[in-house]
Image (tube, rainbow, N blue to C red):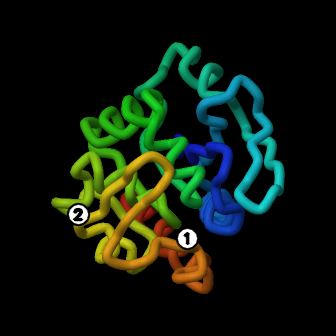
């Protein structure tokens, strides 16, 4: 199973485009509401999405965490900060990495990976261009300071190509 972690403040296009593309490739993708007991998660533009399950529901599965093969972290800056503060996300990242799964991050979420060292050895696939912006990134409170500017607008047109590349990576072992 591939989980897409949705925290309030995520970027809708960057989160839902890969989810849709991966599902069209026949992959088992579930959206998970992180940091809340409700399945309703509000995106950064005020759009509410109903996730497939809550963090608690996923953790209650008897095959958890081994059932999670890959993880995708989408986030606008508010969503990324919510994911960054989550013990659940930490647990999932290290479990997926330890079991040889794939980690992907889009929009500002690569910050979560960069702070945990996942980008140093290219262990993760990131929304195009964000690896360079994360060099020297610092987070203080709700402010992210980088050499560049981590915004959705930088890569909006790359959402679909990124999703297709991610689908290729995650299905290459099955072809």
Front residue of 100 and 131: 131
- Which label sits on residue 122? 2
Q: Which of marks 2 and 1 is nearer the N terminus?
A: 2
Front: mark 2 or 1: 2
Label 2 sits on a secondary structure element that is loop
| Image position of 83 with respect to 153: above or below | above
Q: Residue at x 55, y 70 (%)?
A: 163
Instruction: Tell me where residue 36 appears, x and y as whole percent.
Output: 67, 28
| Image position of 149 with respect to 72: above or below | below
The crowd level at tag 2 (other Cα within 10 Å; few <14, some 14-19, many 20+) is few
Q: Which residue is drawn at 27% across and 46% down?
A: 116
Q: Which residue is drawn at 40% across and 60% down?
A: 110
Q: Which residue is drawn at 38% across and 57% down?
A: 111
Instruction: Tell me where residue 47 appears, x and y as whole percent.
Output: 82, 56
- Which label sits on residue 163? 1
Q: Which residue lies furthest to the left in this view?
A: 121
Instruction: Tell me where residue 149 appears, x and y as whole percent.
Output: 44, 76
Front residue of 22 and 119: 119
Name the side, left or right, on which 96 lies relative to 30.
left
């Amino acid at each position: 199973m591939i989980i897409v972690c949705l925290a309030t403040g995520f970027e809708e296009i960057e989160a839902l485009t890969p989810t849709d593309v991966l599902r069209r490739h026949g992959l088992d993708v579930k959206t998970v509401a992180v940091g809340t007991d409700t399945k309703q998660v509000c995106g950064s533009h005020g759009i509410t999405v109903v996730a497939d399950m809550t963090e608690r529901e996923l953790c209650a599965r008897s095959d958890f965490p081994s059932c999670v093969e890959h993880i995708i972290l989408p986030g606008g800056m508010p969503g990324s900060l919510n994911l960054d503060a989550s013990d659940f996300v930490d647990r999932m990242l290290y479990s997926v990495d330890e079991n040889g799964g794939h980690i992907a991050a889009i929009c500002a979420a690569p910050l979560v990976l960069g702070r945990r060292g996942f980008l140093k050895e290219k262990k993760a696939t990131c929304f195009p261009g964000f690896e360079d912006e994360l060099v020297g990134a610092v987070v203080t409170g709700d402010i992210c300071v980088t050499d560049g500017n981590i915004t959705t607008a930088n890569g909006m047109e790359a959402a679909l190509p990124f999703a297709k590349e991610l689908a290729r990576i995650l299905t290459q072992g099955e072809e």
